[in-house]
Image (spheres, coloured by chain):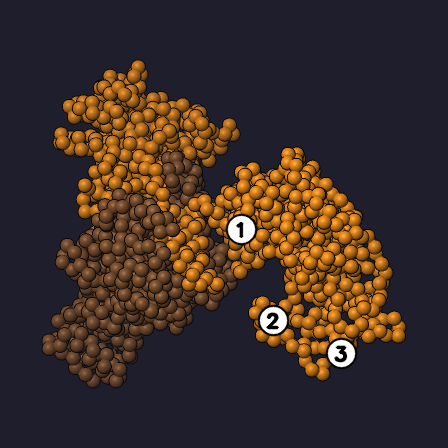
Amino acid sequence: MSACKPFPVDLAADQSGLPHYEPPPCQVACPVGTDVGSYVGLIWQGDLPGALEAITATNPFSSVCGLVCDAPCEPACRRASGDGPVAIRALKRYVMEALGPSFHLPAITPDKTQRVAIIGAGPAGLTAAQDIAAAGYLVDVYDAKNRPGGALAWGIPDFRLPAEIVEQDINRVLERCPGISLHLSAPLGEKVFLDALRADHDAVLLALGANAGRRLGVSGDGLDQVVDGLSFLARINGGERPTLPSHVVIVGGGDVAMDACRAARRLPGVNKVTVVYRRGQEDMPARAHELSAALAEGIEILSHAQPTAIVPRPNGEVELRLRRTEAGPVGADGRRSFREIPESDFGLNAGLIVAAVGQTTLGEELERHGLLAGGRLKADPVTLATPLPRVYAAGDAASGPSTIVQAMAQGHKAAYMILAALEGEEHPAPYHPPYRSRFAPVAQDPEWEKLGREDPRFLGLGDDPWAEAEAGFDAEAARRQAARCYRCDTETGSTDYTVKMREAIFALARPDRDTAAIARRTTERLNARTPAPAQPAPTFDQLVFLPANLTRLVIDPYRESCRTATPLGEGLDLAHPLLVGGLDGAPGPVREAAAAALAASGGAWLGRTRPPQAGLPWIQALAPGDSADASAVLVLALGGPHAPATRPTLARPGQLWGLRATPETAGAVLALAIEARPDLLLVDGCGTLPADWADRAQAPDLGLLPRVIDTLRAHRAEEAFPIVWFGGLRSGSDLAKALALGATAGVVSMAAGLALGGAPADQGLAFPPDLDLQAARQGLEQFLKAAVSEGSMMARCTGKTDIHNLEPEDLRTLSLAAQAVTGLPMAGVRAPA
Amino acid sequence: MVTIDLSSLSVREANDALRAAAARGEDIDVINPDARHHIGVGLVHPVTVRVHGSAGYFCAGLSHGARFEVESNVGWGVGDSLYAGTVVVGGNAGAIAGVALRGGEVVVKGNVGSRAGQVMKDGTLLCCGNASFLAGYMMYGGRIIILGDSGERVGEDMSAGAIYVGGRVQSLGSDAKVETPSPDEEADVKAFLARHGIAFDGSFTKVVNAGTKLRYGVSEPIGRPQPHTVFSEGASYWNAKVVEDIRAKSLIGRYRIRGYGASKAVPHFSDIAIKVDPARVGAAGDPLAAVTLATTLGDRFGAAPLRLSMPVMIAPMSYGALSKSTKIALARASRLSDIVENTGEGGMLPEERAEARQLIYQCLSGRLGWNIHDMLKADALEIYISQGAKPGLGGQLMAKKVTRELAAIRGIPEGIDLRSPSRHPDIMGADDLVIKIEEFREATGYAKPISVKMGAGRVRDDIKIAYKDGFDFVQLDGMQGSTGAASTEVLENMGIPTLAALQEALDGLAEIDHKGDMPIVLMGGIKDGVDAVKALALGASAVAMGTAALIAGGCISCMQCHVGNCVVGIATQDPEHEARYKTEVQAQAMHRFFEAVRWQIAALTQALGHTDVRQLSRADLVALTPEAAAITGLPFDPAYRAVHEQLQSQVA
C-alpha cells in the first residue's frame, strides 16, 4: 500500500516495536488503540491540545466516547485491581468538553476519482467514510433516518448523550472530509439499491447496524402493550415524550435495557419501572456504571425471572407471566448459565412491556442478495468481504450487537480493507489497530500513589430529567485522576528492568499463558540483542568502588566517622575536599550566594576575580595577562588550553603558587612542576577553566589524572604537592573517584551552578532575574554537604575512615575503554590487558 | 542432675548431652569448662546450668528459659540473643556482653568489655563493676545497669531503652543524653539488684537517646524516575537526570534514596548469547520430562540440605521492606513451585513459615527478629554480610514502616526510625565468622545448612574466606541486585556487576584448588530462565530471583519502594495500600512465572543437547561484547546472532 495513508489505517505507523515503548493494557484493550497513557500524562502536564490530538487521532467520535464509551480500557487498567482504575473515560470527556467544540481539522480535498458507497451513518459507517475520504476518495454515505449517527442518535437517550455532542463529532468528520456526501432518509431497498450502488461505486460497505429489536419469543409478544427496545428508544430520541402507563416493565439486562428503563423513568405517567432479567443481577451484560445509575434513579431489578407468556388483562394492562430461575455453572462462553425452577411461576402486571432482549439486522434487499444469515450480514471476519464482490460489511450488522468503540474499530478495519482493494493490494496484512505513543512525561505528583479513584458526580434525574445525568471533572479533579496513572507505556528508570523486560515477565505470569506463549517469549529473549551501544569516551560512570566485605573490615558509620579535612597548604586548610570555580562571569548576586555558601561549608574559591566574601580562601586563577593579587592565598597559573602554564609572578613574597595542566599541556606543565615544585597542581580534565561553568560543554578526560600520577610517580614526585581535579564532578561519588585516582581535592563548577538554581541554557546557565538568593546560597551549601557526605560514604564502604585514604585499588572499571584510559582493571578480569 | 566434663567431651558432644538432660528437666553441672566457646547455646528448657570455672564465647547464647551460673569469667557475647532466662557470671565478661538480648537477665559481678548490650532489645544487663567503651551501642530497648563507671561514649546511637550508671558517666555517646531517673525507675533498679542479692547504696544517672539523629530534617521530594533513556544510550553528560539529582540534593543536603538496583548499563547476561537454535527450543517433546532440574544445596558438612525442584530460589527480601501479604505470597509461590524462600532481614513471619515448604532464615547485624525458636524452625540459616545493592552499609527502615506487628517480630519498639549497624557486633573478620558459624551449628545441632549472603566487592578474595570459614553455600549478589531503599550513589557506584562477581567467585575458588567445591547461588538482575541458563552454564549452582518475582506478582518498576506508599501494595506497611495486593492472585502469578522459568531452563537445556541442568557449560555460550568476553573468557562473537539469522533465512 502506498505510504500516504490516514493514520488509523496505516499499519506502518505502529510503534510497538520501538525499544522504549510497550503498548499498555488500556491501549491494547481499546479497539481503536487509543494512546491512553499519553493523553492522561498530557492532561497532568496541562497540555490539553496535546491530549486532544492523542484522543482524536484514532477516534472520530471522541466527544461521544467521553460520555458513553463502554471503556474496556478501564477494567484492563492495572490499577483496577488495586484501588480502582484510572478514570480514563471521564478524563477524555474533560478534554473534549474543554476543546471539542472548537476543534476542527483541516479539510482534505479528494484527489482520487474512485467512489465508495457506505450504507449507514453510524459509528462504523462514518469512521470508514472518514478514513476512505481522508485517503482522497469520494464517499457516498446513505442512511435510512433523517439524522446521521445511527445508534448514537437514535439508540442512546439525551440524558446520557445529548444530540449536540453527536453532531459535534459528525460535523468535525464532515468538515474534515469534503469528499463525503451524506444522503439522509435513504433506506436501503426503498431509495437505494445494492445493484445500483455496485454499478456506480468501486466498493460498497454495509454498515447499517443492528437495526431491529428482537421479539420476546413468548405468546402474547405481539400485543400492542409490547414494544421492542430499539423502537422505544428511537421514538424518544426522535423527540417524543409520550405519556405512558404507570408501571413499565423492561425485559433484558443489557445496555439497551438500561437506556430504556431510565428513559421510561423520565416519561410522564410512569410511577414505577421494573427490569426483569433471567440471570442474576451480577450477570447482567450492562455496564456496572449504567446499572448503578439505573438503581440510583429508583429502577427496580427483578432478577432470576424468565418470561413465559404475556396475557392481556381486562383493564388494558397485561400480565407478564414469569418463572423463577436459578444460577447454573459457568458455560463455555464464560457466562453463568441458568435453569428454570419448576412450579415457580408468577405474574407481574404492567401497562407497557419493553423487550430489550437483543437486536438483529433486517432488510429485504439484503435477503434478496443472500447476504443475511441468522440476523447478521455474511462477512469474512478477517477481510470483512461479503459473498458479493466489492461489497463489505462492518459494524453491528456484521458482527452482532456490540459497542460504539467496537463499531469504530470495524469502520477502521473496513476502510483498511477497502483502501487495499482500491489500491490493488490483493493480500493486505491482517488489520490491527496501530499502536502509537506520544511519549508524554510521567506525572510528577507526590500523591500519585495515594490518590483514590473519583467518579464524575452523578446528577440523576434532576430538574430537567432529560439533561445529562453525569457531570464532568473540573480541572483539579482531572489532574488528580491523571496523576494516578501508572504509565505502563513509559520506559522505566532502569536499563536492567526495562519496560519491555517488565512486560515480558508479566507475560510469563499471565493466567492465560500456555507453553506456546512461553516458547514464543523465550525465542524473543534469545533473539533480543542489545544494540552495541555507541562507545562514548569513558566517564566517571564507568568506574565503581569495591566495597569491604569479608576480606576488609566494614566501617560502621555510627561508630567510626570518616574524616574529610583537606590541607592544601598554608591558608588552605579546608574542611572538605571541594572547591568551587568557574563563576567569574556569573551574575553578582549569584557569586555572593556562592561565596557565602562556600565560606559556611569550609571550602575554597577558585577564580580570576576575588570572591565577594572576606575570609574565604581564594585561589586566583591567573589567565595570561592577569597579574597576581596579594589577597589571593595561592596564585594558579592557567596558561592557555594549548599553551602550557608557566611559573607566575607573585604579588607578595611567600605567596603560594600553582600550575594548571590540561589534556594538551600536561606534558610540559608536569616537566615544569617536577622541576620547580609548585604548591599545587590543578589537573583540568576539560581544559576549559576559567570559563563560566567551565565543565558544562563536555565530559572530562578520564585518563588525564592517571597519566599525571604515572608521570609524577616516575619522577618520584607523586607526593610533592597536592593535586586538585577539575572537570565533570556531579556528585560525591565523582569526587570520591577523583580522590581515589590521586587527587587531594576537586573543583565543582557546572554542578555548583545548578545547585545555585541555574537552569541549563544554550550559553551555560540561566538564572531567573528574581532568583531567591537565600535559597541559592542554601542550595549550594546543601549540595556541598551532600556531596561531601556521599564522598565519605564511598570511602567508608571501601573500609576507609579518611576520605583521603581512597586509592586506585578501590576502583574497578565497567568497560574496556575505561580500563584502557585509567589503567585500572575492569571488574571481573584478572588484570588489565 | 547431670555432670558434664568438658575435659573428656567436645563442645558438640557436651551441648548434645546438655540438651538431652535439659529436655528431661535435669539440672546440669559443667566441670572443667576450660573457657570453651558456645557452652549451653540453644538451650530451650528451664533448667539450671552451673559452669564450674570460666566459659568462652557466647556462653548461654541463643537460649531460652534456663538459668546459667558461671563461677568465673566469660568470653565475649555472653547471653547472645537470649530470649528469656538468667545468666549470672561470677567474674568478668568480655566484649558485647548481653549482645542482642531479646529478654531475660544477664548479671556480671565483675566488669564488662566494650559494647555491652549492643543492639539489645529487651531484658536487663547488669554490670556490677565498670563497663568499657560504647556500652549500649545501638541498643533498641531494654535496660543496662552499670554500678561502676560507664566507659567512654556510653549509649552511642541508642534508639531506645535506658542505661543506669551508678558510677561516673565518662563520656556520652553520639545522640545520647543524661536524665535523672524517676523514683519508680530507681526503685525498680534497686529491686532488681536486691533480687540478685547485690548491695548498692548509690544513686543512678540515666542515659537515654537524645533524638537528634533519628529522623531526617527535610524529606526528599517524591519523584517518579525519568525514563532511563534520559541518562543511558549516549545521553549528554549534564543530562536531565544529573540536573534533577543536583537539584534534589541542593534541597535536602544529603544523598537521594530509591528502590531497585543499579540502573545504569553494565556488562550483564544480555551481553552473552546461548548457542542454541531458537527453533529447537521446546520442539522435541516435553522438556520437563526430558531434563533433570532437581538441585540440592547445603550438605557440604552433613546438614540436611535444601532440596530445590529446580536451581532457582527466591532472593532474600524482608518483611518490612515488603508487606506481610507480599511475603506470604512469595512463600506460597515458593511452595507451589517447590523452591526455597528466604526471610531477609526482618525476622520470620509465622504465616511465611507456614506457607513456605523450605525457608532460609537470615541473620543480620541488628539481629532483628533473630531468635532460637525461629532458627529451629528454619530449613537453613544465613549470615548476611552485605548485599549487592548497598554493600558496606547497614539497613534503614523509616518509622512509617515500623508498625506494631513489624516491631513485635523484629523485637524493637514500635514507630522508631530503625537503623542497623553496617557490621555484625561479633564479626570483625574471618576468624570471628568461623566462631559465629560454629555457634549457630551448636545451637541447632549441626542439622541446618549455613550460607552467607554477600554483595559483590573483592569477590575473588572474599569467596576464599567464605570457603575457608566453612559455609555450606554462598549467595552472591551483584550490583544490579535490588533493595527497598538505598542511596542512589551507592546503588550506581558501589560493587561490581553480577556477571563479574560470578566470574571472580569461580576464579577465586579455582585459585585455591576448590573449583566447584562450594555452591554459588547467583543473584542480581536474573530475570528469567534465559538468564538462569547463562548463569548456570558459567558455573553458578543455582540462581535467586527477587525483583523478577515481584514484577511477576504485580510490581510495576516505579522504583519508589522507599516511600512506603507502594501503589500496588508490595513495598508498604500502610494497611490501605497493602489492601491493594491480592495475596492469592499474586502468589499464583509468581507461581506461574516460576513454572515458566522452569520450562525455559528445561527447554534450553534440552535444546542444547543435555539431559541434566548440570551438563550446561561454558561451551554453550558466546560473548557478544568485548567486555563480556574479557570477563568470562568466552569466545567473542558479536556476529553470533547474524549468523544464526542467516542460517534461519537459508532454511526458510
Image-based side of A413 in relation to B568, left or right: right
Q: How far apart are marks 2 and 3 (CA)?
A: 23 Å
Q: Mark 2 lies on which chain?
A: A
Mark found first going from the N terminus, 2 or 1: 2
Mark found first going from the N terminus, 3 or 1: 3
> Which dot, 2 or 1, sits closer to the camera?
1
Residue at numbered disc 2: A336
Q: Residue at x 26, y 19 (%)?
A: A643
Q: Which residue lies furthest to the right in this view?
A: A315
For the question of whether residue B170 can be seen, the reply is: no
Q: Residues within 10 Å of mark 3 (few under 14, many from 20)?
A: some
Numbered circles on residues, count: 3
Identify the amino acid type marked 3: Phe
Viewer-proximal residue among A392 and A245: A392
Residue at numbered disc 1: A430
Q: How far apart are marks 2 and 1 (CA)?
A: 33 Å
Viewer-proximal residue among B444 and A245: A245
Residue A763 higher or lower than B487, as above or below: above
